[in-house]
Amino acid sequence: MIAIMLALCTGLAFCACGAKEKEVVEKETALTTVGFSQIGAESDWRLASTSSMQASFNATMGYRLVYDDGQQKQENQLKAMREFIDSEVDYIVLDPITELGWDATLMEAKEAGIPVILVDRQVSVEDDSVYTAWVGSDFLLEGQRACAWLEAYLSSISYEGEVNIAHIQGTTGSSAQIGRSDALEEAAEQMGWNIVAQEDADFVQAKGREVMESMLEECGDLINVVYCENDSEALGAIEAIENYGKTPGSNIAEGEIMVISFDATEDGLRQTLAGKIALDTECNPNYGTVAEKLISSLKKGEIVPHEYYMEESQFSGLSEVNTITVDGKTYDVTMVTDAIIAGRNY
C-alpha cells in the first residue's frame, strides 16, 4: 500500500512539474520578441536610452527583449541585425551608428517580414520603406536653436567683437553630427562667425578633452566659443579649458570661453547651473515608451507614422534670452534649476 501511495505521489509530482513547465513555455511563447541593436554605452545619455528600452520591453509588458551592444562599430550592429533576422524575432529596434550602409540588411528584414523601428539616429537608404518608422530628434533644429540663442545672447550684451568658434563634432556621419554641424556651418556663414577649428571627438568625454587641448595649443587665445555636439564632449572640453588656464563662462569680451552643448544630461545641466556651459539644448533619449506604442499599434494592424519627433527643451543659467525664434516659430529657453536637475533620469 505504501509503495502504491509513493508511486501515486511521485506521479502527481511529475504531472505538477510538467504542468508548470508547460505553463512557463506557453508564457514565454506568448511574449513578443524584440531585438534591440544599440550603438554602445559611451555616455550617460546612451545608457539612459538603453534603460528606456529595457523598461518598455520586458515580460511585464508582454515582451522579451534581445539586447545587443554594438560597441561603437557598425559591423557589430550589422551582425546583430542578421542574427535577429535568423532567429525570427517579431520586431527589430535599431539605433544606427551612422546613416550609410544599411540598405541590404534592412531589405533582408523587410523580406523576412520583420518590421524595423529606428530610434535616435537615422539612415540614408534608397528606399525608406525598408524600415517601418523612425523615432528621434530633429538634430538640424537642435543646432539651429543653439545658434539662434548664441546670436540672441551676443546681441543682448551688445557684443561687437569677433566670434571664433572651436567646433567639437560628434561621430562623423551620424545623424546628430550631420544635423548639428550643418546648423552651425550655416549660421556661421550667415552671421560672419569664424569656425577656427573643427574635429570629431566621437561623443566621448576623454576624446573631447584631447581635441580641446589640441585646439587650444593650435589656436591659443583666438577661441572664445566652443560648440560641442554633446555633453560628454563639453565636460571634456571644460577640463581642457581650465587646465589651459582659461575660464569657461559667458563673458567672452573679458577672455572667458563660452561652451555650448547638447543633450541636457544631469551632469551637463549641473555645469549649466554653475555657468560653465552657457546653453544646453535637450536631446531626449527616452524612446522606449514611444517605440513600444508603435509596436503595440503594429500588433493591432494599425498604421503608424513614418517619423515621430520627440519633444525637447533648451536650458541656460543666463537670464538675458528667454525665447528664440527659428523659421518663424518661437521656442522657450528654460532657466535651469536644482529641481530640474533632480528630476533628470540621465
Image (cartoon, grey):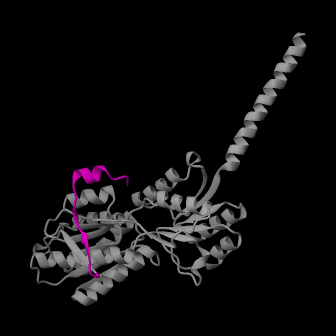
Front-most of residues 318 and 15: 15
Residue at the spot x=24%, y=77% of the render? 325
> Residue 297 magenta-drawn?
no
Residue at the spot x=65%, y=50% of the render? 31
Observer able to see residue 308: yes
| Residue 101 screen position, x and y as percent | 58, 79
* Left or right for 315, reference 308: left
Front-most of residues 5 and 300: 300
Front-most of residues 161 and 245: 161
Residue at the spot x=30%, y=72% of the render? 212
Within the image, what quadrant is residue 35 found in?
Answer: bottom right
Residue at the spot x=17%, y=66% of the render? 247
| Residue 113 screen position, x and y as percent | 69, 69
Quadrant containing the N terminus in the rendered view:
top right
Is the residue 109 above or below the residue 317 in the image? below
Observer able to see residue 200: no
Farthest top residue in view? 1
Quadrant containing the C terminus in the rendered view:
bottom left
Give the magenta range: 327-346
* Left or right for 58, reference 242: right
* Left or right for 75, reference 209: right
Front-most of residues 129 and 216: 129
> Residue 343 magenta-drawn?
yes
| Residue 302 screen position, x and y as percent | 58, 65
| Residue 237 screen position, x and y as percent | 29, 67
Query: Looking at the image, how many numbered discs can be counted on the residues?
Result: 0
* Left or right for 22, reference 128: right
